[in-house]
Amino acid sequence: MLFNTRAGIDALEIPYKSSAEAITDVITGRIDYFFASAVNAVGSKDKLRVLAVTTRVRSEMLPDVPTIAETALPGYDMPAWGGIVGPAGMNAKVVQILNKAIARSLASTDLRERFLKAGLVASASSPDELKKRYEDWMVIFGQIASDAGVKPH
């Protein structure tokens, strides 16, 4: 949705049950493009043309593929990401201990390689950085929803 909005493309978004179905539809020409994971893109490189990656920096898995920001939309940065969260009001000391342990784990070569094989780049952050990321994305998607006329219930 963000890509379509920023690029000024009026496209119909089609929900798929699996990436394999969407990739098949791109290969057969039923749809024009699909945002796939890096693993799917690498696995389908002989059948698809990988146009760009959605992150602000090039993918370690696809180093020759430019970013959307490089090719068409300066400043575009829409990686797929996840975070580790706990219940509201969680003890700050516990959060600090868990954050340090997670950061240590993500720094290990073995875990980094396992993530890369799955098409993921793991990086640690602080609770405040994760909160800011959520807040920034809420602003981005709030604007998209507002522009599309979507009203909260």
Image (spheres, grey):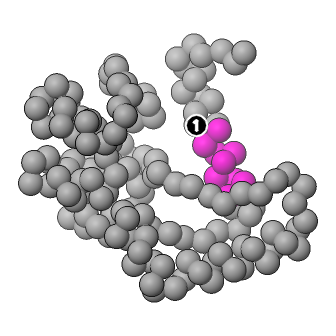
Q: Please tell me which residue is depicted at 45% across the width and 86% down the height of the picture.
A: 109
Label 1: few (<14), some (14–19) or many (≥20) C-alpha neighbours in 10 Å: few
Outermost residue toward the bottom in this view? 109
Residue ID for mark 1: 140
How far across and down, in percent of the image, does residue 11 sit? 33, 21
Q: Please tell me which residue is depicted at 26% across the width and 36% down the height of the picture.
A: 22
Majority SS type along the magenta span: helix
- The local secondary structure at tag 1 comes to helix
How far across and down, in percent of the image, does residue 140 sit? 58, 37
Q: Quadrant of residue 138?
A: top right
In the foreground, 64 or 72: 64
In the foreground, 24 or 42: 24
- Quadrant where the image shows the N terminus: top left
User: Bounds of the magenta span?
Assistant: 130-138
Q: Is residue 72 visible?
A: no
Task: Give left or right: position of 98 versus 24.
Answer: right
**Which amino acid type is marked by label 1?**
Ile
Q: Quadrant of residue 123?
A: bottom right
Q: Is residue 132 magenta?
A: yes
Q: Please tell me which residue is depicted at 22% across the width and 40% down the height of the picture.
A: 23
Q: Please tell me which residue is depicted at 82% across the width and 53% down the height of the picture.
A: 87
Outermost residue toward the front in this view? 17
